[in-house]
Amino acid sequence: QVQLVESGGGLVQAGGSLRLSCVASGSIFISTMGWYRQAPGKQREVVATINRDSRTNYADSVKGRYTISRDNAKNTVDLQMNSLKPEDTAVYYCKAILFGYDYWGQGTQVTVSS
């Protein structure tokens, strides 16, 4: 069992930055962690993922603007978001994969004003 708690969302102007953090508790070995987002009226989509070896993958829409990182010792995964755009507005969710099961956080709202 894994519990995920996100923090760091908020309201920012276009061009600004935010940093999201997610802390996982309940397990000491999590394989892939990632960030997803869901905008109103849209499906949830992957933003970025990172495995235990710190190999990363990014959605094309955020490449060059977002950076995902993790600390395996602390079971944390962060998402640094720069050059934010209004279309980045969404609820951002942290996800962890443990033994083939997906665990999700409760989500944190990111709103980018134009």
Image (spheres, helix red, strand yellow):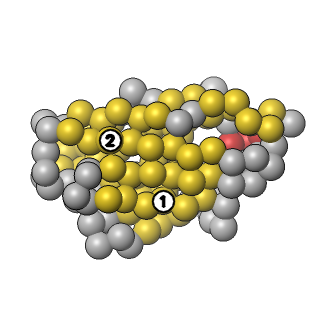
Q: Is residue 39 visible?
A: no
Mark 1: secondary structure: strand
Q: Position of residue 94 (x, y in %)?
A: 40, 41
Image quarter in which the C terminus is found: top right
Q: Is residue 39 above or below residue 64?
A: above
Label disc, if present, on residue 11 of the rendered structure: none
Seen in the image, is 29 located left or right of residue 5? left
Q: Is residue 111 visible?
A: yes
Q: Which residue appears at 68% of the width and 36% of the height?
A: 89
Q: Are marks 2 and 1 in contact (CB under 8 Å)?
A: no
**For mark 1, what is the residue?**
68
Q: Which residue appears at 38% of the width and 42% of the height?
A: 22
Q: Position of residue 100 (x, y in %)?
A: 17, 51
Looking at the rendered image, the disc whose residue lies closer to the viewer, 2 or 1, is 2
Residue 73, quarter of picture: bottom left
Task: Give me the C-alpha separation between circle 2 and circle 1.
Answer: 14 Å
Instruction: Say what amino acid the circle numbered 1 marks.
Output: Ile
Seen in the image, is 99 located left or right of residue 40? left
- Foreground residue among 102 and 3: 3
Residue placed furthest toward the right: 114
Q: Position of residue 51 (x, y in %)?
A: 31, 65
- Foreground residue among 96 and 27: 27
For disc 1, the neighbor class at 10 Å (few under 14, some 14 to 19, many from 20) is: many
Of the two numbered discs 2 and 1 on the same chain, state the one appearing first in sequence: 2
Mark 2: secondary structure: strand
**For mark 2, what is the residue?**
23
Instruction: Say what amino acid the circle numbered 2 marks.
Output: Val
Q: Which residue appears at 24% of the width and 33% of the height?
A: 3
Residue 103, quarter of picture: top left
Q: Position of residue 99 (x, y in %)?
A: 13, 52
Seen in the image, is 54 located left or right of residue 14? left
Image quarter in which the N terminus is found: top left
